[in-house]
Image (spheres, rainbow, N blue to C red):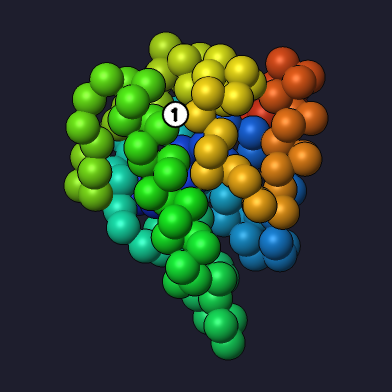
Amino acid sequence: MTVRLRAHHLLCMLTFVGEGYTPAFIANYRRIAERLTAGEEIELVSGPDDICAPLLDEKEPHCFRDSVIARDAAALADVATLLGEKIESGSVLVPDAGLLARLRQNFASGDIRYACRGCEWKELCSRIAASNFKGILIGSS
């Protein structure tokens, strides 16, 4: 199987420690974290993805907001520059130890955090990165 992720979730997954919007969201994200840690491939998608799924039944899910779409574009540009290759909707990435380490190193340095501007989770993610990613649930097996 493949985990479907929108671009800014490539950054969010780096610091996921089990916190989130709702209990259903957290439970879903934990299952996805297990799949990614097991090496399941990531397919980039445009718009809501597997992580967003529990939020889509809300009256006005934030997953469709222009600000979230802009966050995706910023993350996609940063990650593509870092990897030195064109990545877009439909691209497949393998979340192996090398890729996760490279992303985390550049996340911690701030090089791929343009998409994080204005995010309600920015401070939490900054603390996790500053702790050398203590407690992360993806790639921590």
Q: Amino acid at mark 1?
A: Ala
Q: How many marks?
A: 1
Q: In front here: 104 or 26?
A: 104
Q: Is residue 130 visible?
A: yes
Give the residue at mark 1.
38
Residue 68 percent coordinates (x, y): 50, 60
Residue 60 percent coordinates (x, y): 56, 83
Where's the C terminus, which quadrant? top right
Residue 25 in which image quadrant: bottom right
Q: Is residue 5 visible?
A: no
In the picture shown, does residue 139 fall above or below 66? above
What residue is drawn where x is 71% and y is 48%? 121
Q: In front here: 117 or 138?
A: 117
Residue 104 in which image quadrant: top right
What residue is drawn where x is 60% and y is 25%? 110
Residue 31 percent coordinates (x, y): 54, 47
In the picture shown, does residue 99 fall above or below 51? above
Q: Is residue 72 left or right of residue 31?
A: left
What residue is drawn where x is 70% and y is 36%? 125
Using a 10 Å C-alpha cutoff, classify the residue at mark 1 as few (fewer than 14 neighbours), some (14 to 19) or many (20 or more).
some
Residue 46 in which image quadrant: bottom left
What residue is drawn where x is 77% and y is 40%? 123
Residue 71 percent coordinates (x, y): 48, 52
Q: Furthest-bottom residue in view?
A: 59
Q: In front here: 21 or 72?
A: 72
**Secondary structure state at the residue bearing disc 1:** loop
Where's the N terminus, which quadrant? top left
Q: In front here: 35 or 13?
A: 13
